[in-house]
Amino acid sequence: DTAVSQTPKYLVTQMGNDKSIKCEQNLGHDTMYWYKQDSKKFLKIMFSYNNKELIINETVPNRFSPKSPDKAHLNLHINSLELGDSAVYFCASSQVMDQPQHFGDGTRLSIL
Amino acid sequence: SQQGEEDPQALSIQEGENATMNCSYKTSINNLQWYRQNSGRGLVHLILIRSNEREKHSGRLRVTLDTSKKSSSLLITASRAADTASYFCATGLSGSARQLTFGSGTQLTVLP
């Protein structure tokens, strides 16, 4: 029944490693997003995809690469993890871009 | 720079009291949305108000929008301990860049 699900919920890894976070939505939405929430709870958009096409790519290091195999999935791959990447990453979806978004419960990434 | 900024950053009240949170933004918007985030969870959409609306109600929530002052307020009446959460405003920008831009939230604590 979960509308937007992302895995894993927790990710603890060492600096320099490569990791992926998966996201799936069963709402039939056309648009999906990745956000980064820092320790002060500031939520910043990283990427937005509409029907598998990249719409927004904010100032994000190219170590971060989103992949959308189909409209219902948007995965995030991160290469060469750095200490500053520690944060909570949220996947979200909406029917169109400025309409209400549905969020997953987040992936808490900790870099050792 | 952030588009939406909430005020206050933290608010602590007794159960049964009303809670008011404010949001200011900088550029023209299509709509403004309020979200709630419980600890360890994703954001949940509460209410959307369009730029041509001045006030909107949903249950115990009342949202106002003043586009001349570029500000909005969220009022929660008769608060309950379960309302304890962070509350975020998000602005849907007008023009081609219709992404949502979030503030850093107001942490509301309702004491039983």
Image: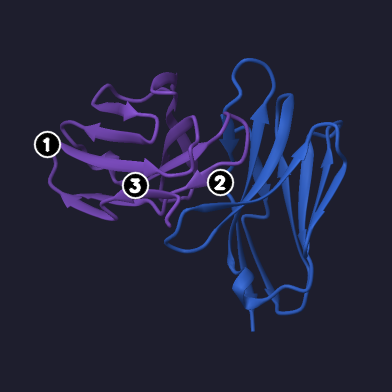
Chain colours: A purple, B blue
Chain where mark 3 sits = A
Residue B26: tell me if it is visible: yes
State the residue at coordinates (48%, 50%): A41
For the C terminus of chain B, the image quarter is bottom right
Label 1 and label 3: CA atoms lie apart by 16 Å
Chain where mark 2 sits = B
Q: In the depicted view, which residue is nearer to us: A73 or A76?
A: A73
Which element is circle 1 on? loop
Q: Looking at the picture, which amino acid does disc 3 mark?
A: Ala
State the residue at coordinates (36%, 42%): A24
Label 1 and label 2: CA atoms lie apart by 29 Å
**Taking A73 as reference, is B78 above or below it?**
below
Q: Looking at the picture, which amino acid does disc 1 mark?
A: Gly
Which element is circle 2 on? loop
Chain where mark 1 sits = A
Q: Is residue A53 left or right of residue A13?
A: right
Q: In the depicted view, which residue is nearer to us: B110 or A107?
A: A107
Label 3 in the same subunit as label 2 = no
Query: Which residue is labeled 1 in the image?
Result: A16
In which image quadrant can residue B75 be found?
A: bottom right
State the residue at coordinates (29%, 27%): A67
- Numbered tag placed on residue B104 in the rendering: 2
For the N terminus of chain B, the image quarter is top right
Query: Which residue is labeled 3 in the image?
Result: A87
* Dot 2 crowding, Cα within 10 Å, few <14, some 14–19, many 20+: many
Which one is earlier in the sequence, the residue at label 1 or at label 3?
A: 1
The picture places residue A43, in percent across and down from the top left corner, at 49, 42
- Numbered tag placed on residue B40 in the rendering: none
Q: Residue furthest bottom?
A: B112
**Taking A107 as reference, is B30 above or below it?**
above
